[in-house]
Image (tube, rainbow, N blue to C red):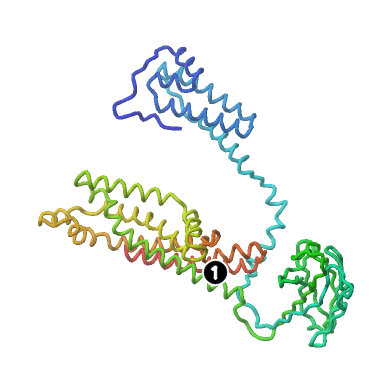
Amino acid sequence: MANDNESASGPSPQKVNSPALAAGLSLLVPGLGQLLLGQRNRALALFLSILISGLVIWWQSLTGLYLFLAFVWLWNIWDAFNLAKTIRLSYFPPLLATLIIIYSAGWVITQIEPQKLLEQAHRAAPVVQGMLNPDFIERESESRKERGPFEIPCSANPPSATTTLASGATLTLSESCGAVGDTLQIEGRGFWPNVETEMWWANPIGQEQRLARDGRQIIVLTDEAGNFSAQVVVPQAVPLSHETGEAQRHAVQIIQTRVIGGWQLSNNGQLVLAKMAETLAIALMATTFSVLLAVPLSFVAARNLMSSNKLTYAIYYIVRTILNIVRSIESLIIAIVFVVWVGLGPFAGVMALTIHSIAALGKLYSEQVESIDFGPIDAIRSTGANWWQMVIYAVLPQVVAPFLAFTIYRWDINVRMSTILGFVGGGGIGFLIVQWQRLSEWNAIGAAFWSIMVIVAILDYVSAKARERLA
């Protein structure tokens, strides 16, 4: 609720003197009695509290909260009655009742269900495991990919159920043709021994997909002789055979990977490093571009430098308003605009962060300019120097160090922000995180998270030390 500080000219004159009349007016319209007693802020606070609370209760159909609303309304009547007798009541009771209404509605609107944290904890297990086992480095290994043909639907001459591979291994399917939803028994002989073997499906146009059971990919371990057995269900893989009416050649695909050497960066680790470098570059370029524009803007957005006449004062208000508006728009929203404008990729991220950083740095720089010592400025003016000479010789020497500190701080912020620009197509590590999340590649996401945390922690330490030196 608002406080009771009235305007500089003092409270409005009382238009009612009767406590009963004041209470009756507040019964009809909340705050009306207080208003006519000269308490404008108190009246407005009560009126808006009851109005907003009532709308929230009605909107969310929280009928049980009407009791608290009634309490606030009754308190408003009692308050008007006491104000007419020059007795001021504490705000706490109606404030507490209003907060109960607002937070209860917020609880419902946000669908907070704490029990789900325990009931569905198992869903978070893959994510936690991925964080604890990031796919960043791996043992040097070799892979093999083998296929056994499967026809959908069956033709007059279906392929053989047993495929003999170049290595001498054999892959046998219980059926060599069938339909979507059929269950296949797969038997492998002569593969690499004691190696995890992944089950995949390849459709006629080359697309591959994991074969899963109960949401988990089917992976079997070969025995000492390199043999394995697995059961899979024929998936619905495009193109659909029933759309063409002709038999199409799909394939059961077997992938094996075994360790043959020491440690090395995994494929996902290499992608993480490349995208983290892109993330840092986005932040660096955006910060540099924004400084080049924010520095000159900060001088025309400083009241003390632009108050000499009406024209410069108008320019000050226009620039300051634009900076405030742009700064209020989240960089992700700006990134969406530039993704549409210039396309997917880091350039859109650079432009989004540049625009947002210009507004943020322009405000910080201008506030620093407004706090400078006016002694050197007056001395330069007394020599007949113009506005630009005053800025160069009297203002810049006082703001260079703070400007550098703000710039380093902003670059630190931009590194953090650029990590999520990829969520909307603005390049950087966020682009990989979105793709891996869709594929449930939690180990790869773990590698990205750890990389972000390490780099951000290092940059935070370095920027803090740099700002200390410049302070």
- Residue 148 image offset from top left, x and y in percent: 81, 77
- Residue 464 image offset from top left, x and y in percent: 40, 64
Question: Would you name the residue on which mark 1 appears?
Answer: 451
**Which secondary structure lies at badge 1?**
helix
Relative height, residue 225 to residue 413 (above, below): below
Figure label count: 1
- Residue 264 image offset from top left, x and y in percent: 61, 81
Task: Name the residue nearer the viewer: 319 or 109.
Answer: 319
Outermost bottom residue: 167
Relative height, residue 342 to residue 62 (above, below): below
Residue 93 in view, yes or no? no
- Residue drawn where x is 53% and y is 23% of the image: 73
Left or right, residue 326 beside residue 295: right
- Residue drawn where x is 30% and y is 46% of the image: 317
Quadrant housing residue 143:
bottom right
Quadrant housing residue 270:
bottom right
**Quadrant holding the C terminus:** bottom left
- Residue 184 image offset from top left, x and y in percent: 86, 69
Residue 282 in view, yes or no? yes
Outermost left residue: 383
- Residue drawn where x is 34% and y is 55% of the image: 362
For label 1, count other residues whose C-alpha is less than 10 Å away and answer few (under 14), some (14-19) or many (20+). Answer: some
Q: Which amino acid does label 1 sit on?
A: Ser
Task: Name the residue nearer the viewer: 184 or 91.
Answer: 184
